[in-house]
Amino acid sequence: MSGKEFFTSRYERLGWQYREVTLKQAIRINNTNAKGKKLLPRLESLGVHIQKIPFLDSGYWVLDSKVSAGATAEYLLGMYSIQEAAAQIPVSLFTHLKGKKALDVAAAPGGKTVHLADLMENTGGIVALDVDKWRLNALVNHLERCRVSNAVVYMLDARQASTLDLKFDRVLVDAPCSGNFASDRDWFKNRTLKDVERNAGLQREILTEAVDCLSDEGEMVYSTCSLEPEEDELNMDWAIKNLNLQIEEVYCSGEKGVTNVFGKQLDPSIKHCRRLWPGETQGFFVCKLKKRSPKP
Amino acid sequence: MNTRAITDFASQFGVQIALNLDLMVEKTGRFYLVNPALKPLVRQDFFSAGVFLGKAKEGKFFPSFNLLGMLAKKEANRIILDRKAAWLFICGRDVLRKSIVRIQGPGKKDTNTLVFNEFGECLGFGRIVEKLSGAAGDNEIAVRNVLDIGDFLRRER
């Protein structure tokens, strides 16, 4: 079970008509580093024309640019990061980050870790995990470029996060996923339903471990850049039924999570998840969770 | 922990830095400074922790940009470049005398200097190879590029 027709017919059954999309480059300003630097006029003077993304606090579309946005002095000084617009949402859903202890379970290449550090204003501590050494080097370079000072990085599988023996106030599970056709031209050629199901299984393992690391009052954000419900709503439905989690309402871009997936009725709270179909952004899914309070 | 490599490096720019050893961690010659909130999260098997300051290898010290940033805040010796030269420096080029807008510190030959842009941002450091001011040819290379922030792009190639 694979191919463009197979997957696009699934999207149709979930309520979205497939269309091709061209993604715009986006940047996210690292406010901690850009403060007082007059970044916007500086970019303008370099010929980098940007426009505020209305649904993000610090995100801008790059409309056109005379230079590569990834090779300016301002970029190299960590004043901004190149980060796809939807990918800027997950970290923004956490509340009260300053001084907190945060876990980023699949951190490389580090865009969201840097976003966490920025919102934490380099206070508290972030533990960032990844398994691949090459990707870890990219993560560490990203942290150094953006002058992140409150992160410790481990080469550790997210499924072993509890071996750290720590509890965290905020846990980000930006899970390894199947991706989507908007950011991968060959996506339909390369992906099968079996891949999706395998990734969904891996995500459940990571979620289980991540919950172990979450403090009782803590917040968890789960996100994927997959459009496949097995990795999104179905996994969240599984999580609230098996991991003592509840879904929190969020206010961000995107459509409500799908509560009926191919005839299967899911928990009504799944509607609080957000699903971003490709268009202005890549395909994306995000959900905020908390541990369910014990009944009195 | 022997942090002399770091303090010696700092002194080459005319500044002294005091490092709180309680907040320093070292792994295979790589030095890190962690904040008090982060320290309890740092186990021995970390990959990277807090602020990477640089690495010592075979008797040489290779500073990080974080360390250069710390020196920059401490009035270390520096030169300030015009806009075009600042860009060329980031691209790995040396500094011509005519591109130097301002000098802070003695600017003596065979010493190190931080290199700044017009916005007061540290772009890296270099080695002064000729006197920085005076009558000699303006097109002469005055500062050899040792490390610049373009390294972030080059190191991932």
Image (cartoon, helix red, strand yellow):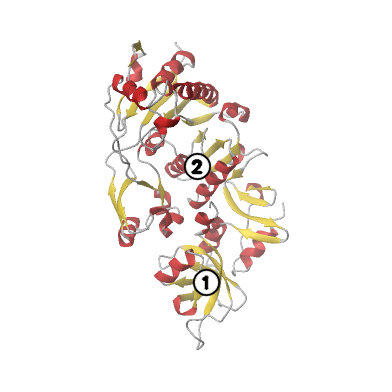
Can residue A216 be spotted in the picture?
no
* Amino acid of disc 2: Pro
In the visual, does A29 lie left or right of B32? left
Query: Where in the figure is residue A226, as x and y percent of width and height?
Result: 40, 29
Question: Regarding mark 2 in the picture, which secondary structure is present there?
Answer: loop
Q: Which mark is residue B94?
A: 1
Q: Which mark is residue A77?
A: none
Query: Where in the figure is residue A193, as x and y percent of width and height?
Result: 44, 22
Q: Which mark is residue A109?
A: 2
Residue drawn at (38%, 39%), measured in percent from left and top? A88
| Distance Cα–Cα, label 1 vs label 2 | 31 Å
Q: Residue A263 versus residue B69: which sits nearer the camera?
A: A263
- Pointers 1 and 2 in contact (C-beta within 8 Å): no
Residue drawn at (40%, 34%), measured in percent from left and top? A90
Query: Where in the figure is residue A108, as x and y percent of width and height?
Result: 51, 40
Q: Is residue B45 above or below residue B134?
A: above
Question: Regarding mark 1 in the picture, which secondary structure is present there?
Answer: loop
In the visual, does A50 lie left or right of A100? left
Residue drawn at (62%, 49%), measured in percent from left and top? B32
Q: Quadrant of residue B64?
A: bottom right
Query: Where in the figure is residue B58, as x and y percent of width and height?
Result: 73, 59
